[in-house]
Amino acid sequence: MMGCNGNVTFGYESQKTIQIIRKQFELYNLGRYLLTSGVMYSIFAKNGALASSYFINQTDFSTFIHSAESFDQYAKNQIYLSINRQLIFSATHGTEHEFWKCMEKTFK
């Protein structure tokens, strides 16, 4: 949480938002795994050494890296939106509000 005070008693809305963010993070991890394993599968699965060598040569790794970076930014934006919804639509105050403001700055 990069310096955000986690020693906060969260209300119901904050707990729901934390669950949503955890789910988003799980989906992000799954997406990263599928993105990477999909490329590796298409190169190596059921291919011999010669075919794998050909597919490695033909794979556009710069596009793969760009899509991975875009995926990272998309996931970060989704978490940021969840944090903003919490700040805008929930009546947090005190240390709970400070926590969400800190999280907003962290993900900005």
Image (cartoon, rainbow, N blue to C red):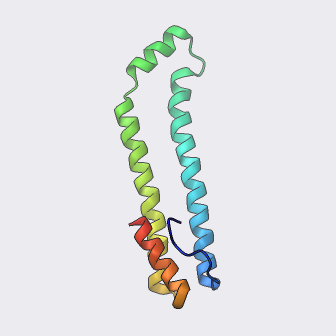
Q: Position of residue 50 (x, y in %)?
A: 50, 8
Please tell me which residue is depicted at 56% across the width and 34% down the height of the picture. Answer: 37
In the rendered structure, the answer to whether residue 23 lies left or right of residue 35 reads right
| Residue 92 visible in this rendered orientation of the protein | no
Instruction: Locate the C terminus and report the quarter of the image it occupies.
Output: bottom left
Q: Is residue 37 above or below residue 79?
A: above
In the rendered structure, the answer to whether residue 4 lies left or right of residue 7 reads left
Q: Is residue 67 above or below residue 8?
A: above
So how many labels did they put on this image? 0
Please tell me which residue is depicted at 63% across the width and 86% down the height of the picture. Answer: 11
Q: Position of residue 65 (x, y in %)?
A: 39, 38
In the rendered structure, the answer to whether residue 18 lies left or right of residue 108 reads right
Front residue of 98 and 41: 98
Front residue of 36 and 101: 101
Please tell me which residue is depicted at 57% across the width and 50% down the height of the picture. Answer: 29
Please tell me which residue is depicted at 44% across the width and 84% down the height of the picture. Answer: 88
Q: Position of residue 21 (x, y in %)?
A: 56, 66
Front residue of 86 and 108: 108
Q: Quadrant of residue 9?
A: bottom right
| Residue 41 visible in this rendered orientation of the protein | yes
Q: Is residue 32 above or below residue 9?
A: above
